[in-house]
Image (tube, rainbow, N blue to C red):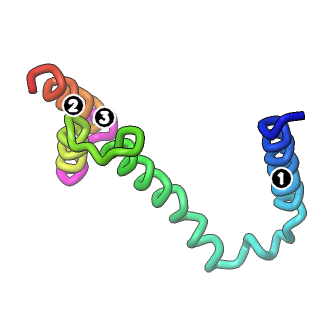
Amino acid sequence: MNSLWIATIGTSVIAFALKYLGHNVPEKFFTHPKVQSINALIPIALLSALVAVQTFSEKSKLMIDHRLAGVGVAILALLLKAPFPVVVVSAAITSAVVYKFF
């Protein structure tokens, strides 16, 4: 067996063990108010990090391109309290126009 298979099997075992242990955590741990407030903020932080990485990087380089214009328009639309579909469509159109013409 080569090292790729060992790494694949090892990470599979670790993933299974983490999921199994997660089901055995007592319920009172998750009902604590501090844990609930932290769990409410985790998706926001992860999505923000994903948007930042996807906007400003390509492979291992820092890039500033048409995606920044799309994110800027999305932020402006959110500040103007536009509905979510309007935010997404306006950001996509702006990014596409900047990509096509610049």
Instruction: Read off the magenta span.
Output: 78-86
How packed mark 1 is, by other alpha carbons closer than 10 Å (few <14, some 14-19, many 20 or more), is: few
The residue lying toward the viewer, choosing from 32 and 56, is: 56
Q: Position of residue 1 (x, y in %)?
A: 90, 34
| Residue beneath disc 1 | 14
Identified by mark 2, the residue type is Ser
Identified by mark 3, the residue type is Val
Q: Position of residue 22 (x, y in %)?
A: 82, 60
Relative horizontal placement of residue 78, taking residue 25 as reference (left or right):
left
The residue lying toward the viewer, choosing from 20 and 53, is: 53
Determine if the magenta segment contains residue 21: no
Question: N-terminal of the two: label 3 or label 1?
Answer: 1
Q: Which mark is residue 35?
A: none
Relative horizontal placement of residue 33, taking residue 81 as reference (left or right):
right
**Most extreme residue toward the front, as rendered?**
2
Question: N-terminal of the two: label 3 or label 2?
Answer: 3
Identified by mark 1, the residue type is Ile
Report if the CB atoms under discs 1 and 2 are less than 8 Å apart: no
Q: Nearer the viewer, mark 1 or mark 2?
A: 1
Residues at marks 3 and 2, CA–CA distance in whole angstroms: 11 Å
Question: N-terminal of the two: label 1 or label 2?
Answer: 1
Residues at marks 3 and 1, CA–CA distance in whole angstroms: 37 Å
| Residue beneath disc 3 | 88
Q: Position of residue 54 (x, y in %)?
A: 38, 42
Q: Residue at x 14, y 29 (%)?
A: 98
Q: Is residue 88 above or below residue 18?
A: above
